[in-house]
Structure formats: C-alpha cells, structure tokens
Image (spheres, grey):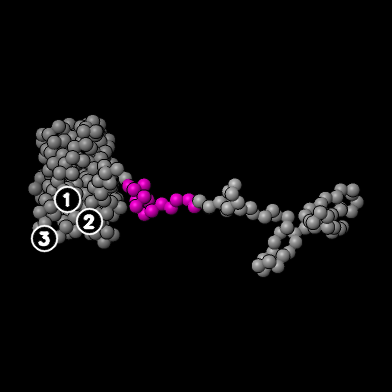
Amino acid sequence: RAFAAHRGGRSMTTISVPGTTARCRRPTPAASSAGGKRVDSAVPARRVGTLSSGAPRAKIWPRRRTARSLAGARALPPFVEEMSAFLVNPSPGLVPAAAANTVVFTGGIKVLLKGLTWPGVINSWFLGTTVMAAFGVGGYVLVCLYFVFGSAVTKIKLEQKQAEGIAEARGGRRGIGSVWGSGIAGIACACLALAGVGPGECLWRLGFVASFCSKLSDTTASEVGKAYGKTTYMSTPPFQRVPRGTEGAVSLEGTVAGIGASLGFAGVAVLAGQADLTGALIATLAAFVATTAESWLRAATQGGAGGVSSPPHDS
C-alpha cells in the first residue's frame, strides 16, 4: 500500500508491505511547469557561489590547449624522428646505410663469423651497404634472410656430407667467392638503381629480389638434395642415375625444397615492400628457370663424366 502525505512543505509517500510491519518513506517528486521542465523537489537546487559583498562569483573556465601547445606535446626527439624516417625510406643513400650497416655488423659479428670467413665478412659489408642504400631496410632484411637461411641449410647433415666428400669447405663458412657469386647480380641492380639508370628503380628492385630468390633456391635445392636425396639424376639427357652431390644432378627432394624456399623468400619480399604479388610470382618463376639452367650448365661442363662436386676453396 502507498499513502501520500504532505509534511513540512515536502510531499512524502509511505509504502507498506502486506504481511509485514515494515514501512519506508521516500520523497515524492513534484512537477513544476517552470520553463516546461519537470523539477524534482527532492533534489536540492544548485547554488551559485557569491563573494562576501554579495556579487556573484566569476566562473573560472579551464584553460584550453592551443594547436601550438598540442604540437609541442606530441613532438618526438630529433633522433627518433630521423630513425623513423630512415626506416621507411625506400632508398636512404650510402652514408646513412653505411652507418646503420656498421652498427649491425658490429653487434652481430659473432653470428656473421659462424657463416662467413673474415674476408667474407668484409665483402658482405659492402654488399649489405649497397643494397640498403638502394633498396632501404626492406632490401637489407632480404639479404639477411638469405644469409641466415642459406647458412642454416648448408649445415643440414653436415657430418654426413663431410663423410661423403660433398660438404662445403670450412664447415659451410663462405668466403669471398661465395659472397660475390651469390650477390653480384643483386649488387649490380642496386648500383644501377643508385645511379638512376633506366628502366627505373622498380624494375631494378624486382631484379634484386629475383636474383636472391634464385640463389636461395639453388642453395636450398643443392644442400637438401645432398642430405635427403634418395634418387639423383642428371638434369640433361639421357638423365642417368648418379651419386648424390654430382655436379648438375637433381633430386625430387632438393627440387621441392628449392621451390619452397623461393616461394617463401618471395613472400617475405612482399611483406618487406620490395615486390607486389605479381612481382613475387615473377621472381619465383625466374628462380626456377635460373636454377634449372644452372643445373644444365653444370651437367654439360662438369658432370658429364659423373664426377662428384668438389667444395669451393675461396678465401
């Protein structure tokens, strides 16, 4: 039950629950027509502050931040801004690239020496600097990926390869000959892009991606074939069966691994901004054609007698 009462200038409502003796009271809101709005008499009116003299107190508004102050608050340190600009620059130039590459080589020298000889490290510095200067950090990442992945597959079943006499020299550490043999085409594309020679930077960038894609595919196919190839055939007629490690020979295991490596490398090139999907497909196809042609050339010049490949002896 609810009973309304008016006490002390305030409307009160008494609520009782049947079957109990509990009662409670609450203020009843009263409607007012002032200004056409409903006014709850239970809510105290808002008081306006006044001074001791009776004059109304001036309201103090919070200070608004201007565009100039906001810009100053968001400003980054010059070093951070320069580093951000360098990371997104598609062609930062030789001086910034040399400085950044020197920092990377200094911090990672122990890792580099696991896959390269000292002469190989020095020559790799020139290769990395040129690529970064022409194609930015994204191109540099691809070179690093080639080095890391290529070094890793070289060490697959290394003891078995050494026992069979088909392993790379010095436990897979690459020297000057391997560095320039792997990077000469990519370096040429980088130098032509820096020089502004036609047909344009985009095509030179695609040529750079395709060159390293081809070299990684060839290295992976060769090393996986030596380690896991069960049946190895010459790549030229009459396609006779030959021992693993024979120059110009191919195996199913190595061929599939090489194609997979080229696809993965091309995918990373897309993520790094060095190629679009069409360019990635072109680079993968070019890698397959290049590795096949190289196998034919090796078979014609060195593998005709069925000789097993000998490890390179560069510095």
- Quadrant holding the C terminus: top left
In the image shown, does 71 or 223 lie closer to the viewer? 71
Dot 2 surroundings within 10 Å: few (below 14), some, or many (20 or more)?
many
Q: Residue 263's x, y, as percent?
A: 28, 53
Q: From this viewpoint, is residue 258 visible? A: no
* Residue type, numbered disc 2: Ala
Q: Which of marks 2 and 1 is in front?
A: 1
Gap in angstroms between the C-alphas marked 3 and 1:
14 Å
Gap in angstroms between the C-alphas marked 3 and 2:
20 Å
Residue at the image position 90 percent from the left and 48 percent from the top: 21
Q: Which tag, 3 or 2, sits closer to the chain's start?
A: 3
Q: Residue 134 carries which label?
A: 1
* Residue type, numbered disc 3: Gly
Q: Give the range drawn in magenta.
A: 61-75
Dot 3 surroundings within 10 Å: few (below 14), some, or many (20 or more)?
few
Residue that badge 3 annotates = 198
- Asked whether residue 62 is drawn in magenta, I would say yes
In the image shown, does 144 or 167 lie closer to the viewer? 144
How many labels sit on residues? 3
In what element is the residue under mark 2?
helix
Q: Which tag, 2 or 1, sits closer to the chain's start?
A: 1
Residue at the image position 26 percent from the left and 38 percent from the top: 152
In the image shown, does 145 or 1 lie closer to the viewer? 1
Q: From this viewpoint, is residue 279 visible? A: yes
Dot 1 surroundings within 10 Å: few (below 14), some, or many (20 or more)?
many
Look at the numbered discs 2 and 1 and tell me whether their residues touch, using CB distance below 8 Å.
Answer: no
Q: Nearer the viewer, mark 3 or mark 2?
A: 3
Residue that badge 2 annotates = 283
- Quadrant holding the N terminus: bottom right
In what element is the residue under mark 1?
helix
Q: Is residue 231 left or right of residue 184?
A: right
